[in-house]
Image (spheres, rainbow, N blue to C red):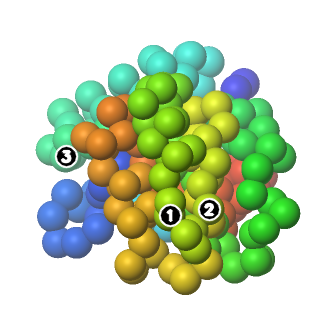
């Protein structure tokens, strides 16, 4: 049965929009999803379902809001899509090996043309960015704190598409978790 990776946007970042991972796993298991696993507290879920990713995304958003009272956007990738995202990393040659410096922003749809142009034409030095498919890869050698690129990729209104980012460590661990089932 297909494995899916569901990424919840903006939960458990502070004292608001709190979602308990044990409650979330129980909710999704009771809703019929198989082998539900979570990674850390920031809304990373690996589960099994015969449903298409778009259906999983819609149902998870409805379940989380309806049963847990938290409205959140969800971005879903299949296990094979996540493996491809890791394999085709366009920044692999410059990545310094620190997983906190490399981020992937997962988009719910292909990047709008004006966003792709803004990222391609922008001067974000020393940060480096590449758009590939429904992902934005960003290398932040000096971290996120003062990064204009990080602020841009975190701003859904400016992106023009639902998005959520994960560091490289989380991305690779999610694939390991999906493969461990």
Give SS at disc 3.
loop
The residue beneath circle 1 is 124
Separation of disc 2 and disc 3 at Cα? 34 Å
Q: From the image, which quarter does the N terminus lie in?
A: top right
Q: Is residue 28 above or below residue 110?
A: below
Which marked residue is nearer to the observer: mark 3 or mark 1? 1
Residue 25 in percent (x, y) is at 44, 49
Q: Which mark is residue 102?
A: none
Q: Nearer the viewer, mark 2 or mark 3?
A: 2
Q: How far across and how far down the image is residue 152, in percent? A: 37, 55
Q: Name the residue that disc number 2 marks.
A: 128
Say which quarter of the image contains residue 35. Answer: top right
Q: Residue at x 80, y 60 (%)?
A: 92
Q: Are marks 2 and 1 in contact (CB under 8 Å)?
A: yes
Q: Classify mark 1: helix, strand or loop.
A: loop
Q: Residue at x 29, y 68 (%)?
A: 13
Q: Position of residue 73 (x, y in %)?
A: 32, 38
Question: Dot 3, crowdedness within 10 Å: few (<14), some or many (≥20)?
Answer: some
Horizontally, is 178 left or right of 72 in the view? Answer: right
Identify the residue position indicated by label 3 in the image: 70
Query: Residue 40 or 135: which is nearer the viewer?
Result: 135
Choose the circle earlier in sequence order: 3 or 1. Answer: 3
> Quick one: 74 or 126, which is closer to the camera?
126
Q: Looking at the image, can residue 67 be seen?
A: no
């Amino acid at each position: 049965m297909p494995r899916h990776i569901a990424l919840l946007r903006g939960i458990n970042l502070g004292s608001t929009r709190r979602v308990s991972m044990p409650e979330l796993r129980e909710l999704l298991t009771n809703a019929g999803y198989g082998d539900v696993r979570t990674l850390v507290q920031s809304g990373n879920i690996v589960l099994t379902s015969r449903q298409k990713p778009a259906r999983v995304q819609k149902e998870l958003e409805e379940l989380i809001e309806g049963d847990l009272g938290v409205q959140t956007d969800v971005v879903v990738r299949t296990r094979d899509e996540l493996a491809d995202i890791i394999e085709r990393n366009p920044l692999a040659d410059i990545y310094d090996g620190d997983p906190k410096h490399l981020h992937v922003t997962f988009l719910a749809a292909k990047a709008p043309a004006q966003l792709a142009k803004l990222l391609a034409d922008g001067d974000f030095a020393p940060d480096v960015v590449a758009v590939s498919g429904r992902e934005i890869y960003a290398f932040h050698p000096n971290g996120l704190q003062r990064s204009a690129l990080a602020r841009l990729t975190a701003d859904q209104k400016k992106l023009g598409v639902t998005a959520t980012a994960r560091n490289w460590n989380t991305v690779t661990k999610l694939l390991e978790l999906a493969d461990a089932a």
